Image: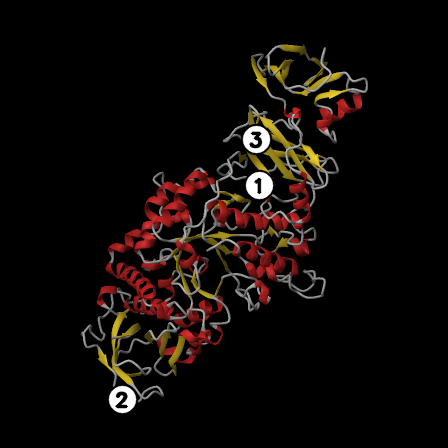
Amino acid sequence: MLNDTDLDALLAGRHADPFSRLGLHADDSGRLWVRALLPGAADVALLDAGSHRRVVELEQRRAGFFEAMVPRRKHRFDYRLAVRWLGPNGESSEGVYADPYAFYPQLGDEALQAFAEGRNMRPWLSLGAHPVQHGDVAGVRFATWAPNARRVSVVGSFNNWDGRRHPMRLRHAAGVWEIFVPHVAEGDLYKFEIVSGNGALLPLKADPYARRAQLRPETASIVAALPEPTPLPRQRERANRRDSAISVYEVHAPSWRRGVSGEFPTWDELAEALPAYVADMGFTHLQLMPISEHPFDGSWGYQTLGMYAPSARFGPPEGFARFVKAVHDQGLGLLLDWVPAHFPTDAHGLAEFDGTRLYEYADPKEGFHRDWNTLIYNFGRTEVREFLVGSALYWIERWGVDGLRVDAVASMLYRDYSRPEGQWIPNIRGGRENLEAISLLREMNEHVGEIAGAVTVAEESTSFPGVSSPTYAGGLGFHYKWNMGWMNDTLRYMAEDPINRRWHHDKMTFGLIYAFSENFMLPISHDEVVHGKGSMLAKMPGDPNDPNLWQKFANLRAYYGFMWGHPGKKLLFMGQEFAQRSEWNHAESLPWGLLEDDRHAGVQRLVRDLNKLYREHSALHRLDCESGGFEWISSHDAEHSIYAWARRDGTGRMVLVVCNMTPVPREGYSLGVPDGVTAWREALNTDSAYYGGSNMGNGVAAAGLPVQAQPAHGRRLSITINLPPLATLFFVPI
């Protein structure tokens, strides 16, 4: 018979090892006892699982605790518990159940040891909720990491959220708690009830490794099967290389087009329309702002709690698998925004998960982000590193996405990021770099780099060296880095009235000084069209009294031409491809009705054709990240705000790009050209009437523009062109 000390501890939910007392156990005399903790039960009987015969009735020693000595049995055997439940109004129900405390430890010692030592980069294979079968008993194996907890129970719809019902087993070496709960199935709700080391009952916690969660404002995790491995289509490896054309369409899934219900679209609704649109527009990749589970819509997904769960806003996770396939079926790559820098403070999340600062740094000078009021992961803790690296691998290996755009990398790299003097802690060398975060990013990129075709992109706004250099060369190992400096400089230039641009000429040329120091991507992202910054069209100068806004539209078209002709991969946020007038609003659908206006439709046609030109001409993309792919023709004509350069692919193919950033047309303009070509033709003109321009240009005559032995721009050969106002022109050899 169980002693009162153990019984009191079990009923109070503070027993150190419930598995040592519940279930079948022999006493010192060899007698077999069965014990069950079933609050809410009225009667419990022990059944032989093979014969289904009743072996013994259990005595209820105290409310919810049942115990009996097993007659005529000396060894453990397979059994079931027949339970009669008593409802709050006196109603009763009956059921036969396998006992969770009849099962041996679930997780292997080797996997737990690897987890404790930081060698398990796929911890999601062990932790979380996994539907499993033990013999003829189906159920779910639950496991969570909470090394400082006194007790952890799994609670859910299957046990009336009662933490006394299923206290878990602590695997001491790893700090992992586990239990197999029979008869739980996919779709069941669950959380973890945790008692801290000092005895405090914490708010119920969602599963950090949950693969599915409730739609906000509800916060429970949902049992979901582990997705099968989904390898990338074979062609993606070639398409994601740095010598390929990469043009990314960035999308906030909830507001691209609202769903049929008027709120969030389902994955299937998105799959039906979005991939086809992106492909028709000529983009090569689709990038989604964070779709992992997050509590607050207004964070746009950047305050993530469910690092393994596609958001319930778009329906069940299976729909996301169909969406990924639809993207790849259109020949597109899929990138996901991924947020390993910080997490929100919501009580059901990771914050003080086991009563201690477990996932976050302990000191607020390291662990609290002042800008976002969020918590910062403890990048130096092995189990946290595994959690983050595992998340990256999970999205790529199990959902088949091409890669990840890693958010807020700069905030990870520096301990003094956005912190005043005295409010940050130096690293062990006395410096400002976060050595643990640097090490984590390298490790993550090395593991992702082992997956054929997978890529990572860094949103990194500082001059930290080697962001896209391989780790063996001392770099961080990203495949691409956003060129924030280029974006800021060129947008400042474009905001100037054309009459003043001569004084800011170098803002458009400065980026070429460092353009090949990283594998750069040129980003016009969501961050540039919110918080009072205005849409891309609104940023452009123009006569406010002109009802046609011709200068605004012309400036925008010229800028897009400049961007697509400039070295670097491309990224454009949704809505900007058709010159959205207002700032992006995450709570509304894009204003697709603007496409009934030919000026907006013209910008859309331009972006489509720029993508086509970029893909079809290897000179515009093959050496995007190498200095051999670029050659200035005219970079100093500040007086006329004209820029001209040649793009090359390393095999002799060339494209010339010329920009006129004033509203002054220039007929008969002499443009110096490289040797080796006898005639050039105009391949694209942003001032074409087809795009909404004035239609000044250089025709499409088969003979093209003949090269003349007339020096210009320091070259012995030239062509004579008509240079439209506020326009970018592309010329290709005939």
Q: Which label number is shown at residue 551?
A: none
Quick one: which residue is furthest to the right in this view? 28
Left or right side of 158 for 35 = right
* Mark 3 crowd level (few <14, some 14–19, many ≥20, 10 Å Cα): many
Nearest the camera: 507 or 391? Answer: 391
Give the residue at mark 3: 140
Tell me which label, 3 or 1, sits earlier in the chain: 1
- Residue 241: percent from left, percent from top: 44, 61
Q: CA distance from mark 2 to mark 1?
A: 69 Å
Nearest the camera: 218 or 120? Answer: 120
Give the residue at mark 1: 125
| Total marks placed | 3
Q: Quadrant of the C terminus?
A: bottom left
Foreground label between 2 and 1: 1
- Residue 642: percent from left, percent from top: 35, 79
Tell me which label, 2 or 3, sits earlier in the chain: 3
Name the kind of residue labelled 1 in the image: Leu
Element carrying mark 3: strand
Give the residue at mark 2: 709
Name the kind of residue labelled 3 in the image: Val
* Vertical placement of residue 613 versus 718, above or below: above
